[in-house]
């Protein structure tokens, strides 16, 4: 076992994703079975007590890897020495709120968090934004952390990736483990594009195995893209355990690497690859190795895929322009 604990900061720790996430981090599933962790839980003052309750339960699990828990409503304390920052807490859209109101309310959260990460986090900090609108919240946080390399700011599309794997596995009648090279492009929103044209099922092209364009267009893509709304409709609350599971997967893959012959989906700061304007936080196929991600290059994008990628990227550009207009970046 390595001796120095890794500091993992979780914002919105008293929320539903926090409750599904913290126990898995403390049990070693985020970073590995040999890595001790120190948890820093950030909440708003009204929810600190609830976070304290969760911390009591964490303590009661007697996790051998859990080296300590700090609970705070102070940004400096929360991000001081953070090696991993999971930005989950966000302002949900409530009745009567326009998209601009939502972006502005979240700007009020992610701007100071970006500044605090810049000033206080560890040099190797890795940030995953889960709170919605995740891509643009990551853009805001990143633009207020000029001293942190841009590649350390990511947003979560791993849940969409996992949803796409599950739908394709059902359609093809194969286990999820038979599928490789799934891709989510663009925004974590209904415009996202889950792309099976580069995916493989037991080594064969997935689109060819399935051979059903009508299913792809009318079933697969909308089911994956609107799954978040379908969960809210069914559960009366947004996805929590699956979102926490995807956050665990995202960081675990980032730190420990993608498997040979496979890749994953992460929303990362674009370098202009595949025509996605530089600086937008957009989902790409990525491989990870040695704690770094790299966008998979050289994939052929046909007209069908191009149109869908462009539509989602156009939405991201609109969100960027809106937060720029609000003075948030
Ligand atoms: P929740 O409302 O149950 O919990 C959010 C928590 O964040 C609350 O405890 C709240 O007090 C806290 N919070 C609010 N502002 C904060 C701030 N400034 N600092 C620290 N904490 C703050 O919500 P949830 O179900 O846990 O979801 C959290 C976010 O994740 C939402 O924005 C949701 O839309 C998003 N989400 C994203 C994905 C994805 O795939 N990217 C999937 C599911 C949910
Ligand atoms: C999800 O994909 O489940 C969530 O992003 C939905 C939401 O709006 O919280």
Image: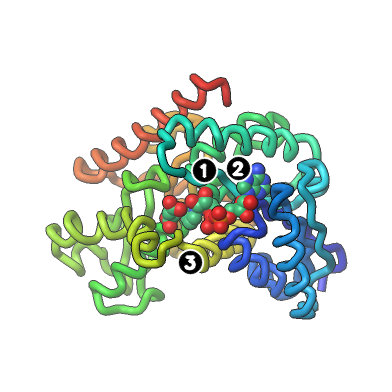
Q: Residue at x 44, y 49 (%)?
A: 296
The residue to which callout 3 is attached is: 242
Disc nearer the start of the sequence (2/3): 2
Residue 175 can be seen in this image: yes
Q: Nearer the viewer, mark 3 or mark 1?
A: 3
Q: Nearer the viewer, mark 2 or mark 3?
A: 3
Q: Residue furthest right?
A: 3
Q: Secondary structure at mark 1?
A: strand
Q: How many marks?
A: 3
Residue 127 can be seen in this image: no
Check whether the beta carbons of the residues at disc 3 and disc 1 lie within 8 A of each other.
no
| Relative depth, front residue between 327 and 250 | 327
Disc nearer the start of the sequence (2/1): 2
Disc nearer the start of the sequence (3/1): 3
Q: Quadrant of residue 51?
A: bottom right
Residue 283 at x, y = what percent? 44, 46
Q: Give how far apart the Cα atoms at labels 2 and 1 are.
A: 7 Å
Up-down relation of residue 139 to residue 61 (above or below): above
Residue 226 at x, y = what percent? 31, 55
Residue 262 at x, y = what percent? 44, 63
Quadrant of the image for the N terminus? bottom right
Q: Is mark 3 within 8 Å of ligand 2?
A: yes
Residues packed near mark 3 inside 10 Å, few (<14), some (14 to 19) or many (20 plus): some
The residue to which callout 1 is attached is: 268
Residue 188 at x, y = what percent? 42, 47
The residue to which callout 2 is attached is: 153
Q: Is residue 148 left or right of residue 175?
A: right
Check whether the beta carbons of the residues at disc 2 and disc 1 lie within 8 A of each other.
yes
Q: Secondary structure at mark 2?
A: strand
């Amino acid at each position: 076992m390595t001796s120095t604990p890794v500091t993992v900061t979780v914002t919105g720790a008293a929320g539903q994703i926090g409750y599904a996430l913290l126990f898995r981090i403390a049990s070693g599933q985020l970073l590995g079975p040999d890595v001790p962790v120190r948890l820093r839980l950030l909440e708003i003052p009204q929810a600190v007590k609830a976070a304290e309750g969760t911390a009591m339960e964490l303590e009661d699990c007697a996790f051998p890897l859990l080296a300590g828990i700090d609970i705070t409503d102070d940004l400096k304390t929360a991000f001081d020495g953070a090696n991993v920052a999971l930005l989950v807490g966000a302002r949900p859209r409530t009745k009567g709120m326009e998209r601009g109101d939502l972006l502005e309310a979240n700007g009020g959260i992610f701007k100071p968090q970006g500044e605090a990460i810049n000033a206080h986090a560890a040099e190797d900090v890795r940030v995953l934004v889960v709170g919605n609108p995740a891509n643009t919240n990551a853009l805001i946080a990143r633009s207020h952390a000029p001293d942190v390399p841009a590649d350390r700011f990511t947003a979560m599309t791993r849940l969409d990736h996992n949803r796409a794997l599950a739908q394709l596995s059902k359609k093809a009648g194969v286990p999820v483990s038979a599928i490789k090279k799934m891709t989510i492009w663009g925004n974590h929103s209904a415009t996202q594009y889950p792309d099976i044209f580069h995916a493989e099922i037991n080594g064969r092209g997935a689109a060819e195995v399935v051979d059903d364009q009508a299913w792809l267009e009318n079933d697969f893509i909308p089911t994956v893209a609107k799954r978040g709304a379908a969960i809210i409709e069914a559960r009366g609350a947004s996805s929590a355990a699956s979102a926490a599971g995807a956050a665990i997967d995202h960081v675990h893959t980032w730190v420990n690497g993608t498997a040979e012959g496979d890749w994953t989906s992460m929303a990362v700061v674009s370098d202009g690859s595949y025509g996605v304007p530089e600086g937008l936080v957009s989902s790409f196929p990525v491989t990870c190795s040695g704690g770094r991600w790299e966008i998979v290059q050289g994939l052929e994008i046909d007209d069908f895929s191009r149109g869908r990628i462009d539509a989602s990227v156009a939405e991201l550009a609109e969100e960027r322009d809106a937060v720029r207009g609000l003075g948030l970046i």
